């Protein structure tokens, strides 16, 4: 409901016997569109062309970038960038500006073949300033974009210095000793060497499949399944998959002392059909609905009806309704054809009206149990409740949230990096990660115009996902982060919040 976003999704393809890598990259990116709609791009490799690796990217959705509404223009793009291997990216900006120069992949040309490379990544480097400082002060680097993608490009280039081509596993091992944060990287060079790595904590998901010697990699498994690859696996944290000289290999490049899979991938971000680290997103969301039903305090009657907020809360809402013996109905219909628009108006009311249509016949005179996946900023939630009552004619609206209260920012690639933009800290002087008081819920419900509010519990969340607590990143729920810079960044943004400061993303130098 609060329109939070993950930074991006990545994809990679290596084919043994044909030059249709872009065809598969396009399809993979199309199925990763949920992870970013701001821009899309690819880099492909073709040994028969002077431009050994070639990059194409632009602002827009995948279909907008590849001009699929115009067959002739689209085919020109597919023919021009045909190749046997390639990497791809879809982006939402959690760092940097919203223009083409920040679109990925980033290509760095060089006269020596193995120093000419392109890459894209999913995540966020928390120690951006720490990494940037020595480059500027000691080696006189200039940053034109001032984002973490540019940081990675420079550090990759520095690893390739010298007259001898290094082993890729050594390159990424050295980088892992410097980087703090989340970083899944897809990389290709002008030799046609293809690399994908997952950061040592495994914060963001990364899946792969191998068929007939062809290798396919994507941020989420649903992208692989939708091109017919059901025998997929999750790349283990701290591991690298490389394709060179016609064969692929998987090896560890960094020590994995612990895992920190982002719980929000299962709650909200990932496609409901995906499987992340062997745990189904759909099953997790149905489990969240069941756990939420155990917390219900309403005296259920025939007047009650469950309305899931589309689309990410649908599985949870249905399971919640089933447990309570209630109907789950689509009283709130999402307009799936709106997409990105620049004429929707600046008022939040306009955006909500464009996005949803109310079915008054279902809502009128009913006691609505509104099931949503999360509440982050709370502004859109308030408008939804108002619409259900004032326009839909609902008698009561009771908000039920499948995620525990978001009490702290995220610095690992989710667009909520300051305490001041979050709803719950406005009501709490002290974060208690194990408890959400009835008083807190009542205050929030009153302010959003709801009759009541119930959040999922942290134990219920962990049980629903089915992974050990120590294998999950729960930083935004508890204020306890898996990396040193995450911890220090939280102290900074909490201090800013208490001082009444508001501003940009906390990990950017401008903040």
Image: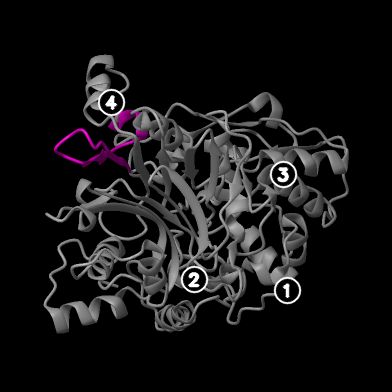
- Report the side of 248 relative to 61 (left or right): right
User: Label 1, label 3: how many angstroms apart (C-alpha)?
Assistant: 22 Å
State the residue in front, 463 or 347.
Answer: 463
What range is drawn magenta here? 39-65
Please name the residue that numbered disc 2 is placed on: 254
Tell us which disc is closer to us: 4 or 1.
4
Please name the residue that numbered disc 1 is placed on: 435
Tell us which disc is closer to us: 2 or 3.
2
Q: Residues within 10 Å of mark 2 (few under 14, many from 20)?
A: many
Q: First in sequence: mark 4 or mark 2?
A: 4
User: Label 2, label 1: how many angstroms apart (C-alpha)?
Assistant: 36 Å
Give the percent coordinates (x, y) of residue 392. 62, 33
Colouring: one colour
Indicate whether residue 13 is drawn in magenta. no
Dot 4: element: helix
Residue 368 visible in the picture: no
Specify the label residue 78 is tagged with.
4
Q: Is residue 153 above or below residue 308?
A: below
User: Label 4, label 3: how many angstroms apart (C-alpha)?
Assistant: 40 Å
User: Label 4, label 2: how many angstroms apart (C-alpha)?
Assistant: 36 Å
Dot 2: element: loop
Q: Pointer 4 and pointer 3: residues touching (CB < 8 Å)?
A: no
Q: First in sequence: mark 2 or mark 3?
A: 2
């Amino acid at each position: 409901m609060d329109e939070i976003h993950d930074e991006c999704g990545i994809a990679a393809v290596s084919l043994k016997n044909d030059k249709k890598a872009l065809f598969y990259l396009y399809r993979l990116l199309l199925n990763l569109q949920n992870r970013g709609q701001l821009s899309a791009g690819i880099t492909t490799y073709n040994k028969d062309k002077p431009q050994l690796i070639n990059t194409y990217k632009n602002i827009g959705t995948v279909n907008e970038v590849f001009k699929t509404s115009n067959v002739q223009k689209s085919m020109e793009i597919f023919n021009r960038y045909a190749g046997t291997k390639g990497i791809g990216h879809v982006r939402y900006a959690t760092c940097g500006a919203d223009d083409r120069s920040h679109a990925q992949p980033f290509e760095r040309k060089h006269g020596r073949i193995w120093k000419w490379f392109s890459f894209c990544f999913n995540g966020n480097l928390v120690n951006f300033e720490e990494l940037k400082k020595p480059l500027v002060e000691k080696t006189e680097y200039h940053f034109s974009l001032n984002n973490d993608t540019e940081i990675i490009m420079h550090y990759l280039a520095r690893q390739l210095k010298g007259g001898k081509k290094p082993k890729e596993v050594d390159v990424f091992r050295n980088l892992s000793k410097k980087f703090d944060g989340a970083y899944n990287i897809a990389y290709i060079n002008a030799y046609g060497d293809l690399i994908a790595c997952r950061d040592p904590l495994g914060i963001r998901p990364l899946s792969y499949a191998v068929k007939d010697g062809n290798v396919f990699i994507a941020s989420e498994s649903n992208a692989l399944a939708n091109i017919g690859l059901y025998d997929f696996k999750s790349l283990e944290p701290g591991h690298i998959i490389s394709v060179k000289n016609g064969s692929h290999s998987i090896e560890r490049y960094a020590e994995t002392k612990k895992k920190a899979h982002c719980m929000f991938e299962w709650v909200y971000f990932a496609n409901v059909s995906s499987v992340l680290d062997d745990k189904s997103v759909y099953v997790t969301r149905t489990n969240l609905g069941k756990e939420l039903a155990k917390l219900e305090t309403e005296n259920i009657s025939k007047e009650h009806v469950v309305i899931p907020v589309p689309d990410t809360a649908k599985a949870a809402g249905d399971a919640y309704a089933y447990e309570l013996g209630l109907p789950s109905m689509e009283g709130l219909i999402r307009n799936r054809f709106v997409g990105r628009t620049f004429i929707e108006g600046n008022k939040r009311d306009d955006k909500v009206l464009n996005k949803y249509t109310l079915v008054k016949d279902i809502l009128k005179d009913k006691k609505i149990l509104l099931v949503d996946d999360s509440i982050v900023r709370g502004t859109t939630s308030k408008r939804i409740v108002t619409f259900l009552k004032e326009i839909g004619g609902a008698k009561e609206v009771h908000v039920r949230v499948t995620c525990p209260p978001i009490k702290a920012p995220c610095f690992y690639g989710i667009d909520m990096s300051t305490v001041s933009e979050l709803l719950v800290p406005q009501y709490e002087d002290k974060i208690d990660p194990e408890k959400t008081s009835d008083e807190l819920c009542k205050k929030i419900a009153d302010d959003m115009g709801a009759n009541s509010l119930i959040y999922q519990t942290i134990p219920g969340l962990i049980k629903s996902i089915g992974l050990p607590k120590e294998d999950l990143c729960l930083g935004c729920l508890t204020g306890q982060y898996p990396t040193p810079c995450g911890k220090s960044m939280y102290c900074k943004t909490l201090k800013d919040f208490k001082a009444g400061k508001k501003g940009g993303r906390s990990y950017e130098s401008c903040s």
